[in-house]
Image (spheres, rainbow, N blue to C red):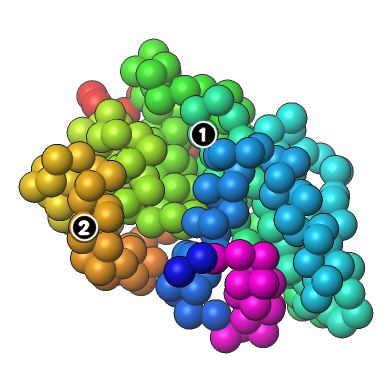
Amino acid sequence: MTYGADDVSDDLTRVLEGTASFDERARLEHHLLTLLRADGGDAVAALLHSLPAHDFRSVDDDLTEYEARFVTAGPGPRHLVVATYLAPEVMWVNVTVEDTSVEPAEPDPRHQAFYDMWESLLGVSDSEVAKLDPVRKAVYLMARLEAEVMNGGLGQYLTNTDGVLLEDTVRCLGAIGARRTRAILLEAAALGAEAASYVAAWESRSKDFERLDGQFMDSGEDLAILTAEAFLSGGRGKGPTS
């Protein structure tokens, strides 16, 4: 079944209304990510700007060269936000809803510290992770896992990283006390080990990956906070591989 512009528009409407299922949201973000990977950011921009039911505009404030952000400009306090990131070895798409009627909460300083460091690492490739100091390595591993899974699930994470980061990531999850997330990742990795490749596992065991994705989302473990507490707040010098 072909997934086209009308389907993108319908799924965006459901996201805005808050009625989109996990599968619909994942399908939407996977389609946009596939387009981003194949044809680049301009193709994603062209698609969003072509949707008659949504008045998307590009927002260029405070973005790096790898980022793009699109926001609907229609009436009402709720707006769709599509953010993309496209670097040589890292890419993601995130679709969210911004409600301007709700007073934004004060940012958690632990989140701030974690994501500030992650932003400084956005140009780092997976092959360069081993050269990072223990603190930056921990932030990279946890942020990369979170970004990939939130964008396309554990299947996407294992496929995009090809298992290169798996051992260190599992060790880091144990070091920060994310036991549930660690167990979920190990179960997902085992699916890949049973197949010819992570791609083959993702395609043949999609329902199993969807179940694990749901468990990941519901784990209750905030990887940013756990990493900040372990490595950024008096935990310097302790690393995921030490």
Q: Camera-side residue: 7 or 126?
A: 7
Give the magenta part as a residue range: 3-19
Q: Is residue 148 above or below residue 214?
A: above
- Quarter of the image where one finds residue 117: top right
Q: Secondary structure at mark 1?
A: loop
Residue pointed to by mark 1: 90
Q: Residues within 10 Å of mark 1 (few under 14, many from 20)?
A: some
Q: Is residue 114 above or below residue 137?
A: below
Residue 6: percent from left, percent from top = 67, 72
Q: Camera-side residue: 154 or 184?
A: 154
Residue 73: percent from left, percent from top = 89, 68
Residue 20 numbered tag: none
Residue pointed to by mark 2: 204
Q: Residues within 10 Å of mark 2 (few under 14, many from 20)?
A: few
Q: Residue furthest left?
A: 194
- Closer to the eye: label 2 or 1: 2
Name the side, left or right, on which 134 lies relative to 93: left
Q: Secondary structure at mark 2?
A: helix
Amino acid type, label 2:
Ser
Amino acid type, label 1:
Val
Residue for point 27% across, 62% down: 206
Q: Quadrant of the N terminus?
A: bottom left
